[in-house]
């Protein structure tokens, strides 16, 4: 028996998300009295694979198959399911991102496994196997019992601290029987965003809403983001108005983010927006309305006009960095 964790790589490199997944999976394995096995798909060098062992993986399987060169959910599901059966994995851990959300339900059907989606903490117990997760767009919490032999957990990003350990991992080349005809996805063109921090990777996000009043007022918000090494984001009304690009829209109908620090500037805090950002560790709200819903979700709040507060906040950050 083992815990299998699917680790994503980007052009052969692992990011913090993968190390977080391995850290989480290794702790779940400890609770079950077993070990964690990390699965990597694609062309990844051994020195990069070795890094997964720094976070608790005892075995690292590198699956480099021509049929898996294109990210196809059905093919990836078949590969992960086959490896899970070979490793006798009773718990499978994947990220609660777009890839994980497309793979986990398919794995559930193939392996007849229950899913604990969007978990943010270690299981409450293993006998019975109970997981803790947010519910109702983050407005409440639930303990969910998974009663099947095999369980699938999708972990919220930035919800579990990375834990480094001594590296005692072994690396193996994996093999699976994947029919090339199964791959239905075709890549026609690749356009990569450069020179800008991706929202899903950012540990700090500075987001603006209609309280910014105009797209011409975005300069101090952008300056604050630059000073903090943060990504910029916005509420849906802002992107709908064309003030900011749709790729920056966070919320239930936009991108789901869970940074360590989220600035909500001029955002009232509608349920749809909070559903996409409520997993943030700390929320700082700036709004003229003291009764705005955002203050109920925020750990820190400033009642005031963003046009007046932001410049002072920028100066305060500059002074702090100068010390």
Image: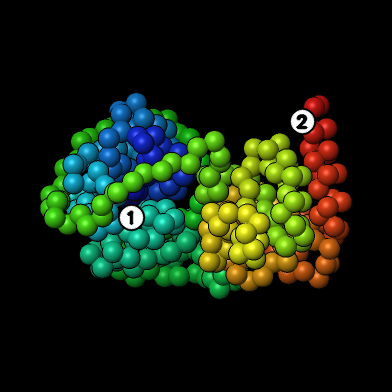
Q: Nearer the viewer, residue 40 or 209?
A: 209
- Quadrant position of the C terminus in the picture: top right
Return the residue at label 1: 92
Relative to 249, is 227 above or below?
above
Residue 293 visible, this orientation: yes
Residue 321: which numbered mark, if any? 2
The reply, left or right, for residue 301 in relation to residue 70 is right
Q: Which residue is at a point 84% across and 63% down the rendered structure image?
A: 288
Estimate how packed mark 2 is, as few (under 14), some (14 to 19) or many (20 or more) residues with alpha carbons within 10 Å: few
Q: Nearer the viewer, residue 305 or 174?
A: 305
**Residue 60 rendering spot, x and y as whole percentages:** 29, 38
Relative to 47, is 196 above or below?
below
Residue 52 visible, this orientation: no
Q: Secondary structure at mark 2?
A: helix
Q: Nearer the viewer, residue 312 or 257?
A: 312
Q: Secondary structure at mark 1?
A: strand
Identify the image quadrant of residue 46.
Answer: top left
**Residue 265 rendering spot, x and y as whole percentages:** 74, 56
Q: How many marks?
A: 2
In three-dimensional space, the C-alpha distance between marks 2 and 1, rounded to whole angstroms, equals: 42 Å
Foreground disc of the pair 2, 1: 2
Q: Which residue is at a point 22% across and 64% down the rendered structure image?
A: 110
| Of callouts 2 and 1, the N-terminal one | 1
Identify the image quadrant of residue 195.
Answer: top right
Are the residues flagged by discs 2 and 1 in contact, CB closer than 8 Å? no
Q: Which residue is at a point 56% across and 41% down the rendered structure image?
A: 197
**Residue 168 rendering spot, x and y as whole percentages:** 35, 31
**Residue 118 rendering spot, x and y as whole percentages:** 47, 61
């Amino acid at each position: 028996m083992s815990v299998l964790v699917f680790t994503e790589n980007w052009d052969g490199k692992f990011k913090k998300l993968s190390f977080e997944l391995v850290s989480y999976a290794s702790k779940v394995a400890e609770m079950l009295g077993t070990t964690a096995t990390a699965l990597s798909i694609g062309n990844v060098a051994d020195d990069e694979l070795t890094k997964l062992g720094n976070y608790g993986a005892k075995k690292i399987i590198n699956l480099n198959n021509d049929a898996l060169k294109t990210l196809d959910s059905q093919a990836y599901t078949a590969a992960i399911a086959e490896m899970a059966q070979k490793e006798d994995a009773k718990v499978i851990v994947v990220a609660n991102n777009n890839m994980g959300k497309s793979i986990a339900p398919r794995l559930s059907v193939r392996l007849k496994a229950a899913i604990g989606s969007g978990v943010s903490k270690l299981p409450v117990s293993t006998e019975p196997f109970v997981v803790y997760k947010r519910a109702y767009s983050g407005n409440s919490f639930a303990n969910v019992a998974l009663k099947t032999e095999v369980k699938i957990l999708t972990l919220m990003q930035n919800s579990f601290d990375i834990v480094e350990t001594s590296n005692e991992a072994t690396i193996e080349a994996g093999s699976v029987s994947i029919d090339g005809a199964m791959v239905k996805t075709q890549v026609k063109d690749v356009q990569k965003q450069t020179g800008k921090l991706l929202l899903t990777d950012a540990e700090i996000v500075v987001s603006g809403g209609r309280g910014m009043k105009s797209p011409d007022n975005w300069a101090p918000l952008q300056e604050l983001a630059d000073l903090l090494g943060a990504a910029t984001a916005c509420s849906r009304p802002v992107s709908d108005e064309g003030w900011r690009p749709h790729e920056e829209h966070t919320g239930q109908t936009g991108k789901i983010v869970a940074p360590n620090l989220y600035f909500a500037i001029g955002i009232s805090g509608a349920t749809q927006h909070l559903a996409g950002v409520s997993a943030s560790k700390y929320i700082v709200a700036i709004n003229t309305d003291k009764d705005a819903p955002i203050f109920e979700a925020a750990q820190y709040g400033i009642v005031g006009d963003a046009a007046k507060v932001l410049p002072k906040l920028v100066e305060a950050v500059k002074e702090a960095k100068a010390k």
